[in-house]
Image (tube, helix red, strand yellow):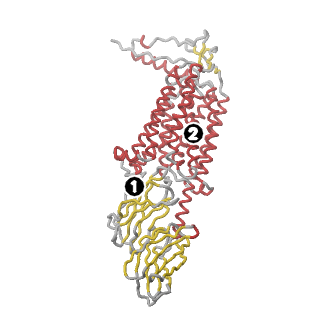
Amino acid sequence: MTATAPRPAAPAPRVPGASALRAPAYRLLALLLLTAALLGTVLSGAASAHSALTGSDPADGAVVATAPQRVTLTFSEQVALGDDSIRVLEPSGKRADSGELRDLCSGSVVKYGVDLRDGLPDGTYTVAWQAVSADSHPISGAFSFSIGKPSATKVVLPKEQPGGGLVGWLYDSGRYLSYAGFTVLVGGCAFVLACWPRGASVRPVQRLVAYAWVTFTAATLALLMLRGPYTGSGKLGDAFDLGVLREVLDTRTGAALTSRLLLAGAAALFVAVLFGPYARREGPGDRRDLVYGLAVGGTIVAAGTAGTWALSEHASTGVQPELAMPLDVVHLLAVAVWLGGLAALVVALYREPSIERGAVERYSRLAFGAVVVLAVTGLYQSWRQVGTWTALTGTAYGRLLLAKVGLVAVLLGVGWISRRWTRRLAETVRVPAQRQDGSEGPEGTARAEGPEGTARAEGPEGTARERAAPAPEAVADPVRAAQLARQRAAVAVARERRVRDADPARAGLRRSVLAETAVVVVLLAVTTALTATEPGRSQEQTDRARAATATAVPDRPVDVSLPFDTGGPDGTGTVRLNLDPGRSGGNALRVAVERADGKPRDVAELKVSFTLDAQEIGPLPVALERDAVGRWTARSAQLPMPGAWRLRVTVRTSDIDQTTIDKNVKIG
C-alpha cells in the first residue's frame, strides 16, 4: 500500500498575512520576561528591606560592668516578631535569655526586648535577631556586647540570611512574574475591550492573555508557599509544611496573597466570557449588552487585585498611607493598561498584522491617558518615598527611581516614534496578485478595508487562484509529494511576506513597538527592585538615628555625688550614684549613701527619679533594691531618649526629717 503525504492547507492571502517570524511573538515575549526576571532578581538581591535597627541596649560592642536585666532593640518602623525572634547567646553558645518577647513600644518609638537570666558569667554575648518589616520584607542581624570584659565566643551564626539563597531567588522571581502576569492580563483585556473588539476572536491574543493568567496565578501560589521559608528558616522544604503555611495565612501578607488567588479565579471567569460569548458575537450591536458588564466587572477585579499589593507593601507604611494606598491602586492599573496593552499590540502586529489603524490609534489615546495618570501618581509616590533631593541621589532607592524615570523617558521617546508610524499607516495596500501560472499579475490588489480590516486579494478575474499543481496526495511517490508540499508552503509564506511588507509603515510600527516592549521588560525589573528597597526618606531617617546613637553614647558611666542635710540629728551625708552606661535606654543604677565620715549608712527612705523637662517626660521613678548596708541597685533605669535629664533624689533619715536634691545630668 502506497503512503501519501497529507495535503497541507493553503493559507488564503491576507493583508498582511501570517508573520514571517517562525517563532510566535508570545514566545519572544516569554524569553524577554525570563531575561528580565533574572535582571530583577539581581537588582532586588542588592536591595535592603524597609525597617532597620536604629539602636540597641546594650549597644553593639559595649562593655558593661554588670549584666543588664534585659536586651532591647529599637527599629525605624513597626516590625513583626515572635517569641524566638531575639536570641541572646552566652560565650559558650547557650541561650542567655528567657525566650519571651517584651513589647516596649511607646508612641513613635518601636522597641522590643527579652529578659536575661540571673547569674550570667562575664564575657562576650551575641544577640541575633530576625523580624518582618511592616511592608512584608524580612530583616535580620546580629551584634555583641560584653559583661565585665570581652572574651572569646563559640557562637557561630548562620551565613544565610532570611530572604536570601535559593528561596530568596525563587521568591524574587515569583514577585516579578506576578507583576508581569498581572500587567499583561489586565492590559491585554483592556486592549481588546477598549481598542480592538475583533481581537477577542484572534488566537494569538487569546493565548497571550491566557498565558498571562497562568503566570500570574502560578506565581501567586508559589509566593504563598514560599512565604514561610522566605521570612523564616530559608529552607525550601518548609514550603510544603502545612504548619508553616498556617502561620503565613495569619499574617497580612498571607491574607493578601490568598485574596489575590481568589481574585485570580474571578479573572478566569472574566477571560472565559471575553473570549467566549463576547468573541462569538458578530457586530458591535450584538456585543453591546456584554461590554458594560465586562467593563465594570473587570475594573472591580483588577482594582481588587492591585489593592492586595497596596495593602501589604510600600503604600501601607510611611507617611499618608490613607492617601497612598488608593493612589497606588490607580498607579498599578495605569501601568497595566499602558504596558499590558503594549504587549497585546506587539502580538497583534506580529501574529495578526491585519489589525486596522483605528485600533492602533485608540490604543495610542488610551496609553496617553495612562501616562498622564502615571505622571501624577508617580510624582506623589516619589515625594512620599524620597522626600529630599539628597535622598534622591544619595540612597539606593533614589538611584533606582532615577533609573526608572530614565527608562520611562526612553519609552515615551520610542512611543512617539510609534505614533508617527501609526499616522502613516495605509488603509489600502497594493501588492501583486499571483496568476494561475505562478507569475505576478499587474492587475492584482490587496486591500485592508472596512471597520473589521477585511483582507481581500483580487486577480484578473477578481480571485487569486492557487497555482495549478498536482495535489500531493495525487502523486504516487511519497518523497515527491513531501517535496511538493514544502514548495507550496514556501510559496505561501513568501506571498504572505510580500503582502505584509507592502506597507512600510506597518513594518516600522512593528519594530518600534517591539523596541518599546524590550524597554518595558527592563522597566518592570527596576520597578520590582524598587519594591524591595528601603525608601530614601526612611533610609535618611535611619541613618540620622544611627548617627545620633553613635555620637551620643559616652565611653564612661555617669557618676554623681549629692551632699544632703535633712536637718535632723545625724542628718548629713552624701548620696553617690553611678549610672551605667549613662545613655538613653536601659541603665544599671547603683546608689550608695554615706555618713559624713564616709561610712555606709541606711536611711528610712530613698527615692530616685528622672525628668526630661524639655520634652515634658517624667518624672520617671526608679525602683531600688537594697543590696547591703547603705547600698541600693536598680538593674534597669529606663531613659527613653537622650537629653538634659533632671535627677531628683529624696532622702529621709527619720519619720519627719527629709530632703530632696536635684541635679541636671547629660544623657547621651
Q: Secondary structure at mark 1?
A: loop
Among the 4 quarters of the image, the one containing residue 420: top right
Q: Is residue 221 left or right of residue 445?
A: left
- The label shown at residue 82 is 1
Task: Pinpoint residue 148: horizontal percent, then vertical percent.
Answer: 38, 75
Q: Residue at x 58, y 69 (%)?
A: 614
Mark 1 vs 2: CB contact within 8 A? no
Amino acid type, residue under disc 1 in the picture: Gly
Amino acid type, residue under disc 2 in the picture: Val
Residue 41 seen from this side: yes
Q: Nearer the viewer, residue 581 or 456?
A: 581
Q: Residue at x 59, y 56 (%)?
A: 391
In the displayed structure, 525 sits above or below 581; it is above
Residue 409 seen from this side: no
Task: Pinpoint residue 95: horizontal percent, then vertical percent.
Answer: 33, 63
- The label shown at residue 478 is none
Q: Nearer the viewer, residue 315 or 658?
A: 658
Q: Residue at x 50, y 66 (%)?
A: 640
- The label shown at residue 335 is 2
Q: Secondary structure at mark 2?
A: helix
Among the 4 quarters of the image, the one containing residue 495: top right
Disc 2 packing (10 Å; few <14; some 14–19; many ≥20): many
Task: Pinpoint residue 157: horizontal percent, then vertical percent.
Answer: 37, 60
Among the 4 quarters of the image, the one containing residue 359: top right
Mark whose residue sits in front, 1 or 2 = 1
Ranked by sequence position, the earlier of labels 1 and 2 is: 1
Q: Residue furthest top?
A: 461
Q: Nearer the viewer, residue 148 or 507?
A: 148
